[in-house]
Image (spheres, helix red, strand yellow):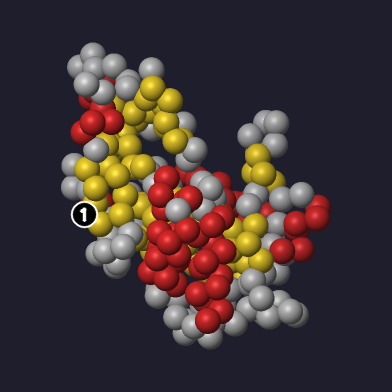
Amino acid sequence: MTFENDRIKVYSSYNNSVSINVIPGHFATNHSHITHYIDMTNLKARQSVARAAAVSIASEYMGSTVVDTIVCMDGTEVIGSYLAEELTKSGIMSMNQHQTMYIVTPEFNSVGQMIFRDNLQHTVKGKHILLLLASATTGRTIERSLECINYYGGIVTGISAIFSASKEISGIPIHTLFKLEDIPEYRTYPHNQCPYCQSGKKIEAIVNSYGYSKL
């Protein structure tokens, strides 16, 4: 039996059409060790579920936020496109000359720095940015994203994640579809403080925003 057989489906309190598969185990990310892998494949890739997620995310920004650009991390571009559509339908305006939103993704260069190429920088500089992520465990990806957006002159007006272990970062609230309360046994540990490692339990998979690779 592998860890995949222990998956549990968890539904969002915002919308029962939106769910994630939660798999308990011992997993390693770039920044930490975690006790549960959160599978968001359907949210990112299935059209109807991505749209339902976007509708729920959009409800957090109705009538209160200017959004010129949605910066998508962790493969959330499909959700980001539907989110732009929902925000526009709800009357949220962008300050772009053409009155529509940009949906962009930064690139990682050969030394791991997050960058926007010259041809994309106009979609960030001076723009009101909504940052969209799949998950945030330690918050480091959000911190790096904020640093990158700030470097290129963007103005972050909102942060949304499908799941986040943190409620805010740098004084900005993180709006989520799934909270720690939805996965009460979820824990994240620094690599050198992981109790599973200390007890001799082997890592079952390496995980990142693309998925997992079993060891």
Which residue is at 51% across, 68% downward? 83
Left or right, residue 166 beside residue 5: right
Q: Is 41 or 66 nearer to us in this picture?
A: 41
Which residue is at 26% across, 27% downward? 3
x then y, percent, for residue 92:
54, 82
Q: Is 19 or 188 nearer to us in this picture?
A: 19
Q: Is 181 or 46 nearer to us in this picture?
A: 46
Q: Is there any visible trace of residue 143 in the rendered image?
A: no
x then y, percent, for residue 11:
25, 57
Q: Quadrant of the N terminus?
A: top left
Q: Secondary structure under badge 1?
A: helix
Q: Dot 1: few (<14), some (14–19), or many (≥20) neighbours within 10 Å?
A: few
Left or right, residue 4 beside residue 76: left
What residue is disc 1 on?
181
Which residue is at 36% across, 52% downward? 163
Tag 1: amino acid: Glu
Which residue is at 42% across, 31% downward? 212
x then y, percent, for residue 98:
74, 79
